[in-house]
Amino acid sequence: MSVFKKSFLARTLAVGVLSLSTLFGGAAHAADDYPNRPIRLVVPFVAGGVTDAAARVVAERLGRELGQTVVVENKPGAGGNIGTAGVARANPDGYTLLLAYDGTLAINPNVYDKSKVPFDTLKDFDSVGKIGDALLVIVANPKIEVNSFAELKKYASEQQHEVFFGTAGAGSTPHLAGALLSQRTGIPLSHVAYKGGSAALADVAGGVLPLSYAAVAGAMPFIQGGQVRALAVTSAQRAPSLPDVPTLIEEGVDDFVFNSWVGLMTPAGTPKSVITKLNEALQNVLKQDDVKERLAGLGVVATPGSPESFHEEVARELDRIADIVRTANIKLD
């Protein structure tokens, strides 16, 4: 090999090593410096709901933990798909977070045509961690002779038609939970979709419908006012705000757990060190007593955990919802 070729190869190798060193050194420095500016937390729904309120509780304290402001941005539309897809396309640098919600990430991909869900839940996002479970409750009109889930089964067997239950809407978490409950118990539950959980609860209170499956937070005013009767919650343990209401497991429906949930995600490809820092901050936030109390007031039980455990739960939920949807033949336009 000529002296010229040896000299050229040596210079080329040196430039390559320097480039790699700059690349990885710069990435490490960026991770060490994170965060050095405000962070966006995108909520793919309008302000004022439980998901938005939970996001704001967490954002405030997350900002304190990280030493930077975490700004909540509401990006509603298409059942949460628009804001969620926007985060999937964002720069994976840790400065854009998603308020991850089961309705958007586990239900929508199973009930809508793929052309209407412009993201892949497991491929387009990295999990940061779960915030908590938003608990659900089954309530009845007080005028029907149903004071427990056992009496509901008896009531259903005596009817000459299906038993109607109202929820916040077609494809909502309570809708899917009711479909699974019907599949598991044989109770002929027939879904009635409303534009919001409060409207369904109001019709149960008014005697238009016998039952509603609803978020605990939304049902609490109706329960406390005696307008509806709580029969059972569908969480693994009793709801802190409804300590006298049994779980469906206690009522004999084995292993029946169906909650809504919220968590944090980032665009796929976010540096591992950034994910770790975000998760540590989130876990510190969720261990604070006043944060847990504020979330509990929204019907959300704080459930801190690792990014890996949250990712695995989301994957399982996608599969479970797919089975429910297929059996109940649920599809949305």
Image (cartoon, grey):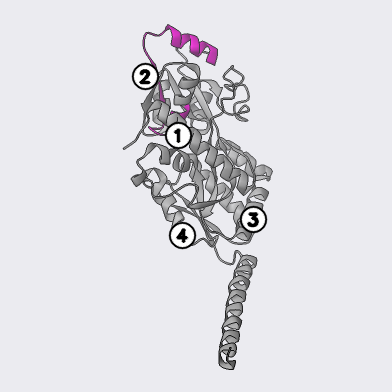
- Kindly report the distance in space between the C-alpha atoms of the residues bearing marks 1 and 4: 28 Å
Q: Is residue 315 left or right of residue 47?
A: right
Q: Hey, which residue is sitting farthest front in the picture?
A: 1
The image position of residue 293, as x and y in percent, is 63, 39
Residue 276, label in figure: 3
- Kindly report the distance in space between the C-alpha atoms of the residues bearing marks 3 and 1: 31 Å
From the image, state whether disc 3 or disc 1 is nearer to you: 1
Q: Amino acid at mark 2?
A: Val
Q: Amino acid at mark 3?
A: Thr
Residue 90, label in figure: 4
Q: Residues within 10 Å of mark 1 (few under 14, many from 20)?
A: some
The span shown in magenta is 149-177
Q: Amino acid at mark 4?
A: Ala
Q: Indicate whether residue 316 is drawn in magenta.
A: no
Q: Indicate whether residue 174 is drawn in magenta.
A: yes
Q: Amino acid at mark 1?
A: Ala
